Amino acid sequence: MTPYTFELFAPYNKIAGLRLKNANARMFGLDIPMELNEEDGYWRATLDLPDGIYHYQYKVVTKSWFEPEPEPAVPEYNIDETKTSEENEQIRKDLQTKHDKQVEEVKERNKKREEELTFTEVWYTFVDPYATEVDERGSDDSFRSVGVLIFKNGRKIVDEYEWKYDNHVPLVSNEKLIIYEIHIGDFEDKFVNVTARMNYFVQLVEMMPVKEFPGQVGWGYTPRYHFAIQSTYGTTAELKEMIDTFHKNGIRVIMDGVYNHCDVSAPYTAIDHDYWFLHDPKDPVWCWGPEWDYEKYDEKYKLWPARKYIGESIRYFIDEFHIDGIRFDAATQIANDKFLKILVQQIKQQARERGFGTEFYCVGEYLPDKPEYVISNGGPMDGVWHDSFYLKLRESMSNEPPKLDELKDVIDARRQGYQNITDVVNYQSNHDHNRLLVDLGKEYQLFDDEAFRRVRMAFAIQATSFGLMMIWMGAEIGEYKEKTPGIAKIDWTLIEDRDDNSNAINKKQLQYYKDVINLRKLNLALTSPNLEFIFEDECDLILAWHRWNPPIYDTHNQGDHVIIICNWAPITYEKYEILNIPRNGRWYEWLNNDEEYIVENNKLIIEDFKDHSVRIFVYQNSSFFPISNTTISTDRKHFIIIHSKIISIIGILLIPIILICLIIIYYFYKQYLKNKYHQETERCIILDNEQISSIDIQSNIQTNENDSTIKYQFM
């Protein structure tokens, strides 16, 4: 038996109690009174517990008022073509008048309820807002749900998972992220099934919300509990194993966080609503539930209640689940950049201190997106969802001719005021929008090869534009289901082998995505900040841009260069001349069997340039040679490119090594000559001394004999 203290932060509630039972017991016993510590605002109850699994709930006398009755939705009216415009206008006005009357009636009822219901002695039973596991006991009724406490070795634990692959391999940096957005339920139903499909992913997975939400099916954008995992997806240990396996494979994981609002049944809504939430929503049109009040400051306890709770939830997921980033849902509605700046700074610092995967990426959903929201321009976020890119790209895939100037603004986001490649995340679809393939059929009656070709065009533009890129699950295989918060599982049979080969177009789509992703991963030009538009023809609807990466050394290597040429015209050009190609020489087409093109006088002639298509050309130099033929496997392409670049780098590194070796050889050769010179000099001096001695002796002899002066000369 070990003492354990249950805590509940509810500083202004009159009474609080604890309900506790062993998980195997059928019913709760008597309520256990809790005591309020006036110094910190916590209610506490300390009990001696043996190891085991427990169910528990809290009870308080509520300070909340009931949630107001929602206002009716604005009526939709479709014009009746059998009626005159005046009749249609009168019908619309009548509907609007009826709606306005209904709204006023709802407001009056809500006001009356708030005045009459004081709830001075109304008890509310709920799950601990900090519970790390929730058992809904087969019901969506939050009053029946219980928190789960696992008590082992005298302490509370979340689970017994042991991390295996922290620092196993380097994780990709923010600048090179390729994001894949998934909904766990629709992708593979459970965490363990996602883990089993690990080889499918690229560099980063962005999970739609996985915190516990009401019901069994949903997207999770109205969270009920901010520390517990959605039980239908699996356990905390299974989520950890999934993330751990992602890290083992060099893949980062971003969590989608909903911090603007929560579900109406979340615990704090009934504990003390106005202590945690705004009394009225900031914007009734854009309201999805009680909105956190980040401006509420408790002078008595010197804290910000909503900031404290949400900050602790985020820190829990960073520490407990080792996530590598957060998407901030509905950041526009949060509308508190001061708080978000502080929060992002704190969580990024926490990520740096954890000792692994120090790169952390925070991206915000701002509608509309603006440069002022990113850190490089003084905002709170590393980047934003680039919704203006989505809108212009989607518009350009219609049957109407696009406005090239508007496209250029979103292809090169610096024209909008963004600065860094991490400032924007480009996408052609996400969970909030239909996949492009669906809309092409619904809105423009484009199907089969015509529709798939436009999807491929949009993806190539997305992958070669300034910024990061994101794929909404299923787009890569031609998934056809419309957007729905209900069940819409990925149809994996679209890429399975079929006897009749009826899904050949889907397999072709997947291979195209793989090849384009492969180019972006391996060619540094596409993750550099360099982009320049080199050719434009408004009449022919042709636009071309150049991406490049400067060489590491200004020597043999000329850097990486990629040219992207788009045809939005409704016709195929048999031959088309593109001017202003930045380099003469050999270029190879990445997605067309590496067909070689020789550029002279900075002109490139393209043949059979199909309508609504993209041609991508890679400049050939010593460090990058053609390997994009789709008949070669992606793994083989990767192998060839990596080894070619390694050979190039080795060649570059050998030059200074050879020079150093020559200098060393020259130095030792000089030393050898110097030593030899000294040796010869010493030998000559010895010989000269011997000759002088010999001459002196002979001279003395001759002088004595002849008594005459002897003169001698040294030769």
Image: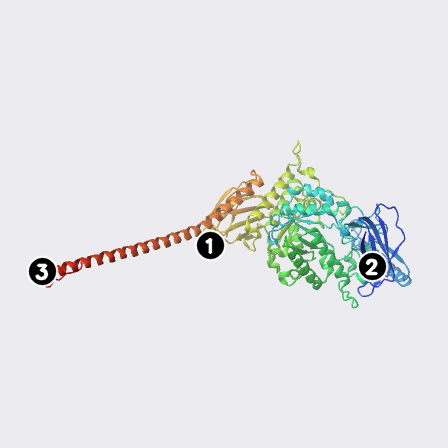
Mark 3 lies on a secondary structure that is helix
Query: What amino acid type is highlighted by mark number 1?
Result: Asp
Q: Residue 396 in the image: state x and y as whole percent.
A: 64, 50
Going from the N terminus, do you reach mark 1 or mark 2 first?
Answer: 2
Q: Which of pointers 1 and 3 indicates the residue nearer the eye?
A: 3
Q: Which of pointers 3 and 2 indicates the residue nearer the eye?
A: 3
**How much space separates mark 1 and mark 3, taking CA atoms?**
83 Å
Query: What amino acid type is highlighted by mark number 2?
Result: Arg
Q: Is residue 506 above or below residue 533?
A: above
- From the viewer's perspective, is 371 left or right of 125? left
> Could you classify mark 2 by the number of other residues whose Cα lies within 10 Å: few (under 14), some (14-19), or many (20 or more)?
some
**Which labelled disc corresponds to residue 262?**
none
**How much space separates mark 3 and mark 2, taking CA atoms?**
131 Å
State the residue in front, 256 or 311.
Answer: 311
Going from the N terminus, do you reach mark 1 or mark 3 first?
Answer: 1
State the residue in front, 10 or 187.
Answer: 10
Q: Residue 387 in the image: state x and y as whole percent.
A: 67, 54
Q: Are marks 1 and 2 in contact (CB under 8 Å)?
A: no
Mark 2 lies on a secondary structure that is strand
Residue at 22% x, 58% y is 689
Q: Residue 114 in the image: state x and y as whole percent.
A: 88, 62
On the image, numbered disc 3 is attached to which residue? 705
Mark 1 lies on a secondary structure that is loop
**Which labelled disc corresponds to residue 554?**
1
Identify the residue at the far bottom of this view. 299
> Could you classify mark 3 by the number of other residues whose Cα lies within 10 Å: few (under 14), some (14-19), or many (20 or more)?
few
Residue at 48% x, 54% y is 553
Going from the N terminus, do you reach mark 3 or mark 2 first?
Answer: 2
Query: What amino acid type is highlighted by mark number 3?
Result: Glu
On the image, numbered disc 2 is attached to which residue? 44
